């Protein structure tokens, strides 16, 4: 390992590592590298650090990544460790700690025996052998499973294999999106197939909804192994069958029909087998055009359904309107197979630059009733609170070409070569979107003939209105509020109310942005000694509860627990809103309540994200449960001021130095640094940081109100329900009669 990696795991600066090398004769000598770029043995460095009381400041996942990297490319150790993850997930934390403490030879022997217990459901599972060089990776894996959970360890191994195989550009379906898609299925589904299973997120979500027979296929062996192990961890009671291969060209389940299909297929794949599959019997709704691979996946899913079975698929927005797919879309609508289309906001899932869509399909039943309408839900727009009859602001569907973002590895299905979830997905309000979508879907399926919809949000469109020359099924095109939907008097009241709120908020913003009291520090910037959060925790100045990745809680496949208190989420940290999450958002330590004065740090942030990374819990938050993707730091108020701590921890430079990743930034709290200042001076800084936080919150609220006001005025004017103000008697007004 390099000196930079030593600084990361020790939670110190590079300069400190250089000082150790010069001042301590017993510091490990370089074992490789060059004089200018020496490399050190990981185990020797860790032993030296432990001997001097330095506990590792690196996260368990980062330590596992380091151990895998030190074995070099082509070692194949990640493949050999997959079965050990499943075996380790069945051990208690005490058993894992005891196993990690034994000598290397015993460790490897016991690890081989444990890995040999892996069931045959894992594709290409073979007896494994661990050599002496693997001991460090085995120990790191056990530590990762013990501290961060089996799912986190599994994702690191898959990340390693995907990187070595150059399978970049494959992305995992966000947990919130997977839950939404699974909940769009009927409650009684038992047999579920994902023909592009990737990391297994969708099948795991189906298992949480009660599915007990799970079928999956993926073209990448690493993804097949990953899904199989994930399901062994998340749904040990379920019967699983995971296969490796090309689902379109070499279907591993040709004679299997299921209750439901969940799928996030690769996008815009031009080599999906158009010529060789031209006469395939699956194309009941028309041969998919060469550049419409998604329509091949749609019909593949329908072919595997029992009559009446449902398929829920994540698809690119261009599929809804491209002219090349018009005929197949028309047949899907005419035949009653397309039941609903839901648009998602951009940045909710990869690829982040476009708003994807969920298509809900159903295989027609022989002799079943004709389906006269298709439901459209515009999830891109955020519904506004207001008077009855007020339209909701809606987004505009992306009209660009579809992307390969679902998978650059042909038919590999969505997975990830990055950490498990994107920054946007981590902070996205999946609970709110899920509630809106499921509410409309339930109302539509319960009484499709009398479903009234909701202006600007959802509408059931007659089939005959969709079968035009374009056959465009973009939700935003069909759900826009019309003049008939809007009450002019209610909209006018809404406009006046918004103007009053905006005037009050502008005054609050002016007060928060007052410049008085700010003074320069002198001719140059102040300098101070600093300590890491790990150092402060060791000294008892604060305690740290690290965020855990999704899947750590409920590793035995149990559904989300029922909670009677709100959950404080990463999104709440960013926005400053009160706790808004539910049971599905719980931290791995579900018993941990938030207390006033706690410092909350977001565990994941996007590059360039301007949202707040830290926040001090107040009385509104007290008693709430901690959510995923949030680190909790509880300072001793006699030694640390919470606002002082939050302000310095959230600084851009501090976050950058304590993080890994580029598009995704994962914050390691132990590496964050804080100046060592007297408590009285801390409080002075803390008050300043509190004012800065209030300024940020005022800016956000003002911007939201201004956007809401502008959107409401534009809607009213363009729909013909608002008249422009009469400015003829206003001094200086232009005479517009000629216009």
Image (spheres, rainbow, N blue to C red):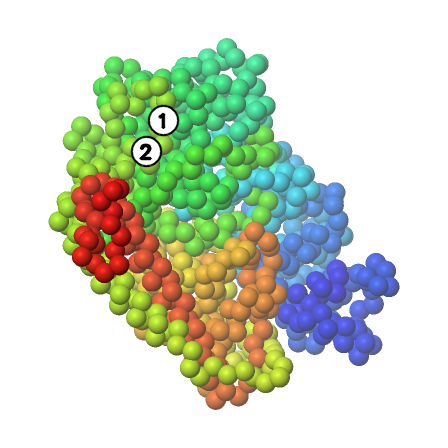
The residue lying toward the viewer, choosing from 372 and 384, is 384
Spot the residue most to the top. Answer: 279
Look at 86% across and 64% down and name the residue there: 35
- Residue where numbered disc 2 is placed: 477
Query: What quarter of the picture does the C terminus occupy?
Result: top left
Horizontal side of 166 relative to 178 (left or right) equals: right
Horizontal side of 365 relative to 290 (left or right) equals: left
Spot the residue most to the left. Answer: 489
Q: CA distance from mark 2 to mark 1?
A: 8 Å
- Where's residue 571, x and y in %? 40, 58
Look at the picture and state if 398 lies above or below 420: above
Q: Residues within 10 Å of mark 1 (few under 14, many from 20)?
A: many
Per the rendering, the mark at residue 221 is none
State which tag comes first along the sequence, 2 or 1: 1
Q: Mark 2 and mark 1 in contact? Answer it, CB < 8 Å.
A: yes
Query: What quarter of the picture does the N terminus occupy?
Result: bottom right
- Residue where numbered disc 1 is placed: 472
Look at the picture and state if 528 lies above or below 509: below
Res 88 visible: no
Look at 62% across and 84% down and name the residue there: 523
């Amino acid at each position: 390992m390099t000196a930079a990696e030593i600084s990361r795991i020790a939670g110190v600066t590079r300069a400190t590592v250089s000082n150790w090398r010069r001042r301590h004769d017993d510091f490990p000598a370089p074992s490789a590298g060059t004089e200018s770029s020496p490399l050190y043995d990981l185990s020797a460095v860790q032993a030296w650090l432990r001997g001097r009381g330095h506990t590792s400041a690196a996260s368990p996942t980062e330590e596992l990544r380091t151990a895998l990297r030190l074995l070099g490319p082509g070692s194949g150790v990640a493949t050999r460790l997959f079965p050990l993850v499943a075996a380790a997930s069945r051990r208690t934390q005490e058993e894992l700690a005891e196993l990690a403490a034994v000598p290397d030879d015993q460790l490897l022997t016991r690890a081989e025996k444990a890995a040999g217990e892996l069931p045959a459901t894992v594709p290409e599972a073979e007896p494994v052998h661990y050599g002496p060089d693997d001991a460090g990776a085995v120990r790191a894996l056990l530590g990762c499973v013990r501290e961060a959970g089996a799912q986190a360890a599994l994702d690191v191994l898959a990340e390693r294999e995907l990187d070595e195989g150059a399978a970049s550009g494959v992305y995992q379906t966000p947990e919130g999106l997977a839950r939404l898609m699974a909940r769009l299925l009927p409650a009684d589904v038992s047999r579920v197939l994902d023909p592009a299973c990737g990391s297994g997120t969708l099948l795991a979500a189906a298992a949480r909804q009660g599915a007990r027979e799970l079928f999956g296929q993926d073209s990448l062996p690493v993804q097949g192994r990953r899904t199989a192990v994930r399901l062994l961890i998340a749904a040990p009671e379920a019967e699983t069958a995971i296969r490796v291969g090309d689902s379109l060209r070499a279907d591993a389940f040709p004679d299997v029909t299921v209750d439901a299909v969940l799928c996030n297929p690769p996008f815009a794949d031009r080599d999906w087998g158009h010529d060789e599959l031209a006469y395939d019997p699956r194309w009941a709704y028309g041969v998919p055009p060469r550049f419409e691979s998604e329509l091949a996946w749609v019909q593949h899913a329908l072919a595997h359904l029992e009559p009446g079975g449902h398929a829920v698929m994540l698809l690119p927005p261009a599929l809804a309107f491209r002219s090349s797919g018009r005929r197949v879309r028309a047949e899907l609508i005419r035949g009653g197979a397309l039941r609903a289309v839901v648009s998602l906001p951009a940045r909710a899932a990869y690829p982040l630059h476009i708003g994807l869509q969920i298509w809900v399909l159903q295989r027609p039943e022989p002799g079943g009733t004709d389906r006269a309408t298709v439901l459209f839900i515009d999830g891109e727009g955020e519904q506004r609170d207001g008077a009855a009859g007020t339209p909701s602001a809606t987004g505009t569907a992306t009209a660009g070409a579809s992307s390969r973002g679902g998978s650059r590895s042909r038919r590999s299905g969505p997975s990830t070569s990055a950490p498990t979830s994107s920054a946007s997905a981590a902070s996205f309000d999946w609970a709110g979107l899920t509630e809106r979508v499921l509410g409309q879907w339930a109302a539509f399926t319960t009484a499709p003939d009398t479903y009234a919809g909701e202006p600007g949000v959802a509408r059931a469109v007659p089939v005959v209105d969709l079968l035009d020359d374009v056959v465009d099924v973009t939700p935003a095109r069909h759900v826009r509020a019309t003049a008939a939907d809007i009450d002019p008097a209610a909209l006018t009241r809404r406009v006046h109310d918004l103007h009053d709120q905006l005037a009050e908020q502008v005054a609050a913003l002016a007060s928060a942005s007052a410049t008085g009291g700010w003074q320069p520090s002198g001719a140059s910037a102040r300098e101070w000694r600093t300590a890491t959060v790990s150092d402060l925790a060791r000294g008892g100045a604060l305690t740290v509860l690290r965020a855990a990745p999704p899947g750590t809680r409920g590793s035995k496949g149990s559904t989300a627990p029922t909670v009677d208190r709100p959950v404080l989420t990463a999104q709440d940290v960013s926005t400053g809103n009160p706790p808004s999450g539910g049971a599905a958002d719980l931290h791995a330590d579900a018993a941990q309540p938030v207390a006033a004065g706690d410092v909350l740090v977001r565990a994941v942030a996007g590059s360039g994200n301007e949202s707040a990374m830290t926040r001090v819990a107040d009385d509104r938050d007290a008693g709430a449960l901690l959510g995923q993707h949030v680190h909790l730091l509880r300072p001793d108020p006699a030694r640390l001021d919470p606002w002082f701590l939050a302000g310095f921890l959230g600084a851009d430079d501090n976050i950058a130095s304590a993080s890994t990743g580029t598009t995704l930034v994962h914050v390691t709290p132990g590496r964050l640094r804080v100046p060592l200042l007297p408590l009285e001076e801390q409080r002075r800084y803390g008050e300043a940081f509190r004012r800065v936080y209030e300024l940020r919150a005022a800016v956000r609220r003002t911007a939201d109100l201004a956007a809401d006001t502008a959107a409401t005025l534009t809607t009213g004017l363009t729909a013909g329900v608002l008249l422009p103000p009469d400015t003829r008697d206003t001094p200086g007004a232009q005479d517009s009669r000629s216009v």
